[in-house]
């Protein structure tokens, strides 16, 4: 009896702290995350919702500085200091701690729809599958940093790595991760799909080869369904 009571109280507290909705966009380089995150932000804003469009690593001044450290090219040139897989992990997590505390949680407490370009699944896919670090340790680190904050829904953009990388090359702003080996990117893609198989209720796989308009429609439809479901629960 005591346990059920405690569980009910915790649930109520969590809901009251989090009136907003948390959606994340995941996938390999060039899969269309930023494009769709931005489109959805525009659509939801037009519908009158309060939206926070943000990204990882980054989202706060401190976390954006960490992003620059993580993505700049010269550190991995061989002539200078390379970033170890462990350092990369620690930096990503440090940026996430700042992002959650100073940006995401305040927005969620304030009835905002938070759209986040990459989140915890990227840590498992890149540092776990890509860099081959211990998945259990990474999952524990993720829990430590997020303190239980999980996305309401995650859109995973999937497409062959060559197509994603070719799109990024067209953009000409290649970062340190874009320049990783094909084997690395393949492991990351397979990693994302494995994670999606583990969390089928949270993660929706999107075919990144579809036209942007079609993808935007699917995402919009899914999010509107979620918003309607939430509105019914609240009334
Ligand atoms: N569905 C799509 N089909 C074709 N090109 C796309 C599609 N989505 C995005 N792009 C283009 O591919 C490039 C990478 O897209 P972007 O959204 O930045 O990917 P990501 O954020 O996942 O790296 C951009 O030039 C973008 O205009
Ligand atoms: Mg992007």
Image (cartoon, rainbow, N blue to C red):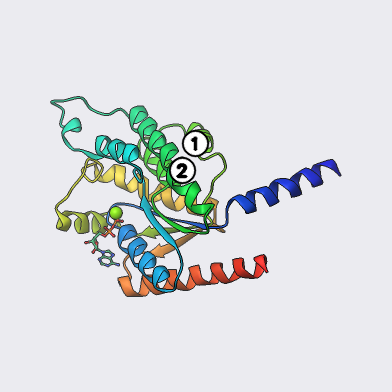
Is 94 above or below relative to 60?
above
Is 17 above or below relative to 91?
below
Q: Give how far across and how far down residue 91 sits, in percent.
A: 35, 33
Say which residue label 2 marks.
100
Q: Give how far across and how far down residue 41 sits, in percent.
A: 38, 64
Q: Exactly how many numbered labels are in the figure?
A: 2
- Which secondary structure, mark 2? helix
Q: Which class describes the residues within 10 Å of circle 2: few (<14), some (14-19), or many (20+)?
A: some
Contact check, label 2 and label 1, Cβ < 8 Å: yes
Is 221 above or below relative to 66?
below
Quadrant location of ligand 1? bottom left
| The C terminus: image quadrant | bottom right
Q: Give how far across and how far down residue 175 sits, in percent.
A: 21, 44
Say which residue label 1 marks.
145
76 left or right, relative to 12: left
* Residue at image coords 34%, 44%: 58
Nearest the viewer among 41 and 188 is 41
Q: Give how far across and how far down residue 156 sits, in percent.
A: 42, 57
């Amino acid at each position: 009896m005591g346990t059920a009571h405690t569980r009910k109280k915790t649930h109520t507290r969590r809901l009251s702290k989090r009136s907003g909705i948390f959606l994340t966009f995941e996938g390999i380089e060039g899969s269309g995350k930023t494009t769709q995150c931005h489109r959805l932000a525009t659509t939801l804003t037009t519908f009158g919702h309060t939206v926070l469009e943000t990204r990882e690593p980054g989202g706060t001044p401190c976390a954006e500085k960490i992003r620059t450290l993580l993505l700049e090219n010269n550190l991995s040139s061989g002539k200078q200091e390379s970033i170890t897989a462990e350092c990369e992990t620690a930096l990503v997590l440090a940026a996430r701690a700042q992002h959650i505390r100073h940006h995401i949680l305040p927005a969620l407490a304030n009835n905002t729809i938070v759209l986040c370009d990459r989140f915890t699944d990227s840590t498992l896919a890149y540092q776990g599958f890509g860099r081959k670090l211990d998945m259990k340790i990474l999952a524990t680190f993720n829990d430590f940093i997020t303190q239980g904050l999980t996305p309401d829904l995650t859109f995973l953009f999937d497409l062959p790595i060559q197509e994603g990388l070719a799109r990024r090359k067209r953009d000409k702003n290649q970062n340190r991760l874009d320049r990783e080996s094909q084997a690395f990117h393949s492991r990351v893609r397979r990693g994302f799909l494995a994670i999606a198989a583990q969390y089928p209720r949270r993660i929706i796989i999107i075919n990144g080869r579809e036209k942007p308009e079609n993808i935007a429609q699917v995402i919009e439809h899914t999010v509107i369904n979620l918003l309607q479901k939430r509105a019914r629960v609240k009334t």
